[in-house]
Amino acid sequence: MKIQILLFASLKEAAQTSQIELELPAGSRVRDALELLKTRAPQLEKWLPHVRLALREEYANPNDELREGDELALIPPVSGGNFEPLIEVVETPLSLDELRARVAAQIGGKAGAFCTFLGVVRDHSRDENGVLHDDISFLEYEAYGAMARREMQKIALEAHEKWGAFVAISHRVGTLQIGEASVAIVAATPHRGESFEACRYAIEELKIRVPIWKKEVAKSGVWWVESGANASEKS
């Protein structure tokens, strides 16, 4: 299949073109396109750890699957070095290590502390009537994707304003089994105290404000946990 790599600003100047066509096997993912791009345009390799990715006009991650005719945009850091949070709503498994590495690549040596949070699916929860169930089988997460990403970005920018934190948030949707990660957060700051505050702020505000819902499926019943409700019970 063929896809187009779209380049802007400094990337376009480095490659001396705004588009590069790549041919990849069916089933390839964004990371495969980036690896091939390194051979087609080696002058871009030094930039790749610092760019954001957009696929079908939505921010993407390296695990996203490509389709015939896709346009994969490589977005360089905004002018002036302004902070732009790494925000994702994805259907693929989360990697906290990968998210932390991406934050580190984005901010260079600015951080002296990284605080991370990983929310995972547990095997027990309370239903809408407060009854405890210890036989959860799996969860299903659903999001209002565009609004969820926008609200998560606001939260990250608020944390940046309050504590100077560089925050990344990745939330998974779809069916998740017991022990799988539903949300990953990284907060990087010059000092440890601010990183703790920013990370806690991000997860607490996410649970209240972001339109993401989960259906808890237990052997003894099925129920939805509404966005912003029962926040202390949400994983």
Image (spheres, rainbow, N blue to C red):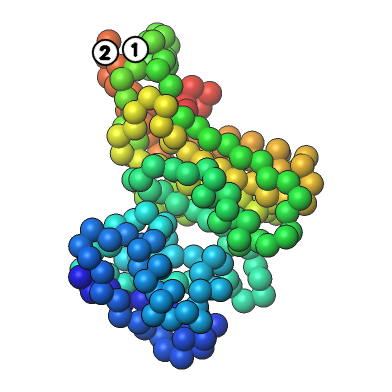
Of 227 and 137, nearer the camera is: 137
- Left or right: residue 9 versus residue 173 is right
Residue 154 showing in the rendered view: no
Q: Nearer the viewer, residue 173 or 74?
A: 74
Q: Amino acid at mark 2?
A: Lys
Q: Position of residue 162 (x, y in %)?
A: 72, 49
Residue 115, position as x, y percentages in the image: 66, 41
Quarter holding residue 133 = top left
Report the residue at 41% width, 15% height from top. Answer: 124
For the residues marked 2 and 1, what is the alpha-carbon distance in whole angstroms? 6 Å
In the picture provided, is 199 more to the left or to the right than 64? right
Return the residue at label 2.
Answer: 219
Q: Residue at x 46, y 91 (%)?
A: 16
Q: Label 1, on which residue?
A: 135
Which quadrant: the N terminus? Answer: bottom left
Residue at left offset 64%, top offset 36%? 200
Could you tell me if the residues under marks 2 and 1 are in contact, i.e. CB atoms within 8 Å? yes
The three-letter code of the residue at mark 1 reads Asp
Number of other residues with Cα within 10 Å of mark 2, as a class: few under 14, some 14 to 19, many 20 or more: few
Residue sitting at the far front: 39
Left or right side of 104 for 181? left
